Image: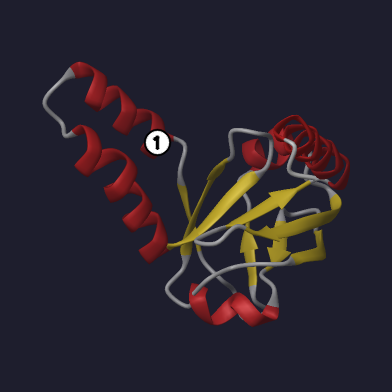
Amino acid sequence: MYFFGTFEHSIDERGRVAIPARYRSAFVDGGVSRPGPEGGVEVYTTADFNAQFSTRQADAVGNDTPEARRLRRNFMSIAYPVDVDKQGRILIERQFRDSAMLTGKILIIGCGDYLELWHPDRWADELARIAALQAEAGQE
């Protein structure tokens, strides 16, 4: 499945957030969450996470050198499984919620092969950075 669009949802006090209804079927086998490098949280289906790891890490760098093993450790050690409950919600790890400032209203952004969870203010900052990059490149 290809994820796209922006959805406003609430994260509850226990750290649960509903996957957008149109995408819940993609998560019937669960998924994987990990912190995103720009301040959000990435949420992959299990299949897409496995493909992402295979493409970016295992196949690309192997396991023959200390550097390759460090890349694997970095990618895998900060990933956690998620399960979808009967209400279509997933639980986001406390440390991810805290570092991404995910409380109350949040945004779920479709990013192709995964979803991103953002605090609205951080997302506005990210959109400003994107606009600045486009302006620099003359693509506005």
Label 1 crowding class (10 Å Cα cut-off): few <14, some 14-19, many 20+? some
Viewer-nearest residue: 124 or 108: 124
Q: Is residue 99 above or below residue 109?
A: above
Q: Is residue 70 above or below residue 61?
A: above
Q: Farthest residue toward the left?
A: 64
Q: Name the kind of residue labelled 1 in the image.
A: Phe
Viewer-nearest residue: 51 or 12: 51
Q: Is residue 40 above or below residue 110?
A: above
Residue drawn where x is 63% and y is 52% of the image: 92
- In the figure, is residue 81 to the left or right of 100? left
Colour scheme of the rendered structure: secondary structure
Q: Farthest residue toward the top?
A: 66
Secondary element type, mark 1: helix
Residue drawn where x is 11% and y is 26% of the image: 64
Q: Position of residue 128 (x, y in %)?
A: 84, 37
Viewer-nearest residue: 39 or 3: 3
Residue drawn where x is 75% and y is 29% of the image: 136
- In the figure, is residue 28 to the left or right of 72? right
Number of labels in the image equals 1
Residue 9 picture quarter: bottom right
Q: Position of residue 67 (x, y in %)?
A: 25, 19
Provide the residue designation for mark 1. 75
Quadrant (top left, top right, bottom left, bottom right) of the C terminus: top right
Q: Is residue 116 above or below residue 73?
A: below
Residue 102 picture quarter: top right
Q: Position of residue 73 (x, y in %)?
A: 33, 30
Q: Position of residue 116 (x, y in %)?
A: 64, 53
